[in-house]
Image (cartoon, coloured by chain):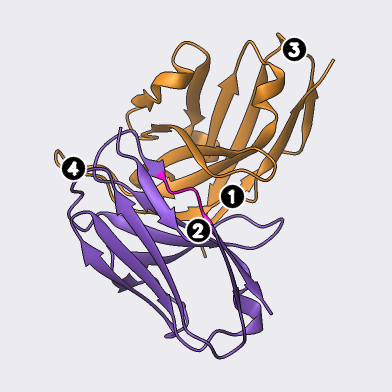
């Protein structure tokens, strides 16, 4: 099973600041890494697929990069509505696995 | 638009079974896999398994083998997840989620999720 390790676990950020979240895979997964946003009492929403491809309708301030074992989600110019928990997810091999999540709080 | 609408909250006693439904609309039900993912309160996401609605083929995470069954009724575009021998640790929100078919080398992203179904296991 591929283990995904996210960091940090928690981040408190002021609006307009840049946020960077990392996800490290226990073995190479190519670009089969996807990012989700989950707000309280809501289901997860896809932001980025295959490491760097934006999903339909996602604001341009969200971007992703990386390949192999190291990946990054960047939120440029954070907005209040971006307060949420962010998860990475690998689909390179079954079982599908998720990172532990990064909670982003707005100061 | 793609929608996955799940059945309502359930309360079950330890040892019982629960069956959650997931009705798909806005796309061809048999053209995408349905995955099931659960989330305990305040915890992360845990993948349970997948089902191909066209063939009925399934694949389950080892943790749930022998306790979970995923089925479908293509005439009403609905997928089902049944979990048996429930224990308190199974208390969680259960999500269905759509994904494209896996290839021999990898699987695509999960793109759309249902709203979730809270299953509470308590005596």
**Residue of label 2:** B26
* Quadrant the C terminus of chain A occupies: bottom right
Q: Do the residues labelled 2 and 3 touch (CB within 8 Å)?
A: no
**Residue of label 1:** B114
Tell me which chain the residue with mark 2 is part of. B
Q: How crowded is mark 1: few (under 14 residues within 10 Å), some or many (20 or more)?
A: many
Residue drawn at (37%, 25%) of the image: B58
As drawn, the chain in purple is A
**Residue of label 4:** B103
In the image, residue A87 above or below residue B82: below
In primary-sequence order, the first of circles 1 and 3 is 3
Tint of chain B: orange
Q: Residues within 10 Å of mark 2 (few under 14, many from 20)?
A: few
Q: Are marks 1 and 4 on the same chain?
A: yes
Residue drawn at (61%, 66%) of the image: A84
Tell me which chain the residue with mark 4 is part of. B
């Amino acid at each position: 099973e591929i283990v995904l390790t996210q960091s940090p676990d928690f981040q408190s950020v002021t609006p307009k600041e840049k946020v960077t979240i990392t996800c490290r895979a226990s073995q190479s997964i190519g670009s089969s890494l996807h990012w989700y946003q989950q707000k309280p009492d809501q289901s997860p929403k896809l932001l980025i697929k295959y490491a760097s491809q934006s999903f339909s309708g996602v604001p341009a301030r969200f971007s992703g990069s990386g390949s192999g074992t190291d990946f990054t989600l960047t939120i440029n110019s954070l907005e209040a509505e971006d307060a949420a928990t962010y998860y990475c997810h690998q689909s390179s091999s079954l079982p599908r696995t998720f990172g532990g999540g990064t909670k982003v709080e707005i100061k | 638009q793609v929608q996955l609408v799940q059945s309502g909250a359930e309360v079950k006693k330890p040892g019982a079974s629960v069956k959650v439904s997931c009705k798909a609309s806005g796309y061809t039900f048999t053209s995408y896999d349905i995955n099931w993912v659960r989330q305990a309160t305040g915890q992360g996401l845990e993948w349970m398994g997948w089902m191909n609605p066209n063939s009925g083929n399934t694949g389950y995470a080892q943790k749930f083998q022998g306790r979970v069954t995923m089925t479908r009724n293509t005439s009403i575009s609905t997928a089902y997840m049944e979990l048996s021998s429930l224990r308190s640790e199974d208390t969680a929100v259960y999500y269905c989620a759509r994904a494209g078919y896996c290839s021999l080398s990898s699987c695509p992203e999960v793109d759309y999720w249902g709203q979730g179904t809270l299953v509470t296991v308590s005596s």
